[in-house]
Amino acid sequence: MNRSQLKRSGILRMALTSSDPDGPGDPFLLRALRIAAVVALYWFVSITMVFLNNYLLDDKELDAPLFVTFYQCLVTVGLCWVMQLLSGVCPGLVDFPSVRFDIKTSREVLPLSVVFIGMITFNNLCLKYVGVAFYTVGRSLSTVFNVLLSYVVLKQTTSLRAILCCGIILVLNVSMLLRWILAWCGPGGHPLLVAGSLSLSGVFFGVLASAFVSLNAIYTKKVMPAVDGNIWKLSYYNNINACVLFLPLIIVFGELGNVAGFSRLAGPGFWGMMTLGGVFGFAIGYVTGLQIKYTSPLTHNVSGTAKACAQTVIAVVYNSSSKSMLWWTSNMMVLCGSSAYTWVKSQEMKKTPHRDLQDSAREKLLSVEKDNIGV
């Protein structure tokens, strides 16, 4: 194997390896502390990124979610260039593929980029209108759409047990939506809707975001051969395409005027927070791979589910909110249904050949984190 092959997707390759990255000679306490540190880092990066995006999108004066997302994609492209430069200067310290822009590869990645734009735009709109406390419930249909669209697009069937787990999430969402609509139509309106902590627009964007998250996973699998199966190369081309596609959308939706009239546009604090959001968006790819490397794809999904629960509780405590029993029950049912689906799929993966296990783990690394982020 030559050097160029060795440098391809180092994090992904390490994440998919079945060997113990710590080495068999490491003491148990050292391995446990290392795993705890990696999981804590993943939680910190992921939760911080969601709250950063919520802070940026919740600004009443700056109503420009497309511009915010465009800038963060631009930061990701810039960080790819920086990492590529550092990889050439310090090859033993930084492992990043050498990427030169190729228009043919860009065209092949374009369908994914269109889906990617829909996913992160509706993600951010959902976060903007429902807030972090309702974000987990608003985006919980991703698992259901995964099953549905995998059958429609890829003709892949799903086991009955996995479908039953999806049914828990689906029934919960439909029943909650009907209850909110009926309460909203009643005298005085629903208190959640009146208070502004929940909006039907936010729920609608959450459903669309869930659908696009699932499409993103499917199209990622389709275009991976165009970038030699390299996660960083895919991120590079995907974000370049997204930056170009966002420009006409920003103009059409009139966000240029909103940005130009923003009072803190020249302030370093605003651009610092915008850039920091982009840095955390880039970093989530690294810590996701790191967590899978030191644990497993299944543990990563369980960690992501637990993180979503903690993220929701933090939002409630931070905002000093008082939530009803329906709200707590809804969140717990979503988390239980998602965890059950993850466990069922992991049991099914154990019965598949090793190559299929690697493909499934690669797809999780590329797409599962999109379920938890706002950009």
Image: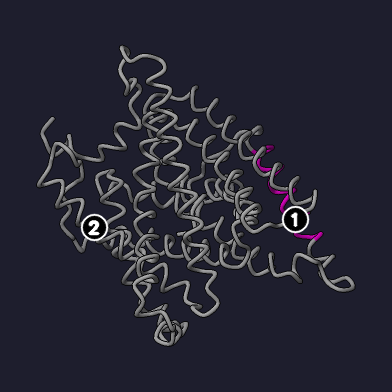
Find disc 2 in the rendering and name its residue. 105
Looking at the rendered structure, the secondary structure element under dot 2 is: helix
Quarter holding the N terminus is top left
Quarter holding the C terminus is bottom left
Where 258 sits versus 3, above or below?
below
- Mark 1 crowd level (few <14, some 14–19, many ≥20, 10 Å Cα): few
* Residue 350 screen position, x and y as percent: 49, 23
Kind of residue at badge 2: Thr
How many tags in the picture? 2
Kind of residue at badge 1: Ser
Left or right: residue 41 compared with residue 123:
left
Residue in the picture at 38% in, 73% down: 246
Where 138 sits versus 330, above or below?
below
Mark 1 vs mark 2: in front: 1
Find disc 1 in the rendering and name its residue. 322
* Residue 257 screen position, x and y as percent: 43, 87
* Residue 122 screen position, x and y as percent: 52, 64
C-beta proximity under 8 Å, tags 1 and 2: no
Q: CA separation, marks 1 and 2?
A: 50 Å
User: Which image quarter: residue 138?
Assistant: bottom right
Q: Earlier in the sequence, mark 1 or mark 2?
A: 2
* Highlighted magenta segment, given as a residue range: 163-179
Q: Is residue 176 magenta?
A: yes
Residue in the picture at 28% in, 43% down: 229
Q: Is residue 105 magenta?
A: no
Q: Main secondary structure of the magenta part?
A: helix
Where 81 sits versus 92, above or below?
below
Looking at the rendered structure, the secondary structure element under dot 1 is: loop
